[in-house]
Image: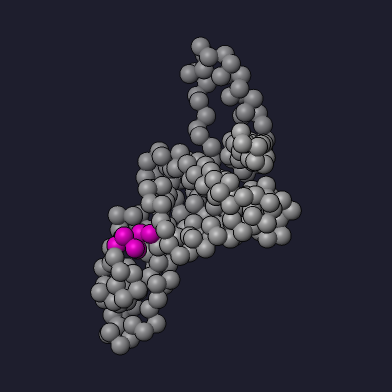
Amino acid sequence: MSPKRTRGQNAGLTRQAILRAALALADREGLKALSMRRIGQELGVEAMSLYQHVDSKDALLDGLVEQVVTQAAPLLTEAASWQEALREYAHALLRALLAHPNVVPLVVSRPAITPGNLRLMEEGLRVLRAAGLPPDRALDMLYAVTGFVVGHVAVLAAGGAAGGAERAASGSAMRDIPEPDLVETPLLAEATRARRAQPSSGTDRRFVFALEAMLRGFGEPCENGEP
């Protein structure tokens, strides 16, 4: 651990450094470990020094959500279509959330409005607007994809602090139903066995299936005739 610095030695401390330390601490020990005192210890500074850059615990938690969400690569300006842009965003966000399973409950519970998150949304809207989509429809699409990805990872992580985190980190699908439990459900048994027989691609097939269905649905005209 670094020795405590005096007030004059804290000039190099930044919001980004504080948030990185908070994320690393949450990854190692979970959200309960987060406190200004612990983060100060991680950085070798007094806890009060952090408030010069992060003015409250709520701002710290919002910044932590920002750290994870903005790890999702920006929507690609070179994408051949808006479908490809949204697909890339969804997979990037999935990877970012799976890399930090301890922070997933925070992402679910805090729709953090921070400059970093707003810039990410603005970039997404710019790409979708350039593809001919009206801003309000583009925003609905971004919210839908983000909510789907966050919900998918939350289900993976819902099995408890240990097992759920392991499933979330590995990106594995929901657990298979044991064979003895399928005796009286022949259709479910047939579907489960067929699913087990399929070769693993390393990607959650349920996630891909649902995402592709969502993207196809976005391409259908709305009731008011919009694309």
Furthest toward the top, the residue is: 184
- Location of residue 184 in the rendering, given as x and y in whole percent from the top left corner: 51, 11
* x 45%, y 39%: residue: 155
Left or right of 41 on screen, residue 91: right
Of the 4 image quadrants, the one containing the N terminus is: bottom left
Q: Nearer the viewer, residue 138 or 72?
A: 138
Q: Nearer the viewer, residue 101 or 120?
A: 120
The number of numbered badges drawn on the structure is: 0
Residue 141 versus residue 181: which sits nearer the camera?
141
Image point (52%, 63%), residue name: 119
Q: Residue at x 67, y 31 (%)?
A: 198
Q: Is residue 72 above or below residue 49?
A: above
The scheme the figure's colours follow is one colour
Q: Judge whether residue 156 is colored magenta.
A: no
Residue 7 position in % (x across, y down): 28, 84
> Residue 121: x and y, percent?
53, 57
Q: Residue furthest bottom?
A: 8
Q: Residue 31: which quarter of the image? A: bottom left
Instruction: Please identify the quarter of the rendering in which residue 197 is found.
Output: top right
Q: Is residue 59 magenta?
A: yes
| Depth order, front residue of 37/148 | 148
x then y, percent, for residue 5: 30, 83
- Magenta-highlighted residues: 57-62
**Does 43 appear above or below 63?**
below
Quadrant location of the C terminus in the rendered image: top right
Q: Is residue 67 visible?
A: no
Res 51 visible: yes
Q: Is 72 on the left or on the right of 33, as rendered?
A: right
Question: Furthest residue to the right?
Answer: 80
Q: Is 99 on the left-hand or right-hand side of 58?
A: right
In terms of secondary structure, what is the magenta stretch mainly? helix
